[in-house]
Image: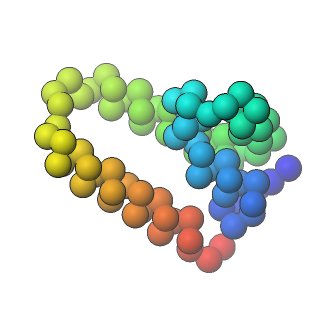
């Protein structure tokens, strides 16, 4: 289908919704669409596997709760980095 290129619509869409996919926060039809894309696109599947691994590691390692202001700053920064990465010319 695609090649993991964030400039290709299928990959960009799958990667943009990856966090929601991993957390099972998508409607069934959207979930199945992303699932099918990951089955067909090795590079996107590798990214999804890395995201799952990081999420599981953080969940196991972090038992203390960060202050809400810190949490919000970190989330904003993660989104900024994600946007920067997805907007880079391929």
Give the x, y percent position of residue 56.
41, 27
Instruction: Name the side, left or right, on which 17 lies relative to 63.
Output: right
The total of numbered circles placed on residues is: 0
Q: Is residue 18 above or below residue 11?
A: above
Residue in the foreground of this view, choosing between 1 and 29: 29
Comparing 83 with 89, the one in front is: 83
Quick check: can you spot residue 35? no
Q: Which colour scheme appears in the figure?
A: rainbow
**Residue under the image location 62 percent in, 42 percent down:** 46
- Whole-percent x, y for residue 89 in the image: 62, 77
Between residues 84 and 4, which one lies in front from this camera angle? Answer: 84
User: Residue 40: x percent and y percent?
Assistant: 81, 41
> Which of 1 and 26 lies nearest the eye of the viewer?
26
Name the outermost residue toward the right: 1
Can you say whether 85 is above or below 69 in the image?
below
Q: State the residue at coordinates (60%, 46%).
A: 17
**Which residue: 57% across, 27% down?**
24
Left or right: residue 60 versus residue 7 is left
Residue 72 visible, this angle: yes
Instruction: Identify the residue shown where x is 41% and y is 62%.
Output: 81
Left of 69 or right of it: where is 19?
A: right
Residue found farthest to the bottom: 89
Q: Is residue 16 above or below residue 54?
A: below
Which of the image's four quarters has the C terminus?
bottom right
Q: Residue furthest front?
A: 27
């Amino acid at each position: 289908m695609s090649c993991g290129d964030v400039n290709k619509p299928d990959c960009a869409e799958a990667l943009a919704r990856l966090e929601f996919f991993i957390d099972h926060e998508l409607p069934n039809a959207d979930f199945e669409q992303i699932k099918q894309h990951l089955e067909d696109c090795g590079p996107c599947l590798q990214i999804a596997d890395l995201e799952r691994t990081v999420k599981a590691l953080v969940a196991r390692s972090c038992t203390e709760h960060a202050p809400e202001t810190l949490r919000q700053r970190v989330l904003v920064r993660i989104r900024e980095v994600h946007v920067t990465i997805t907007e880079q010319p391929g």
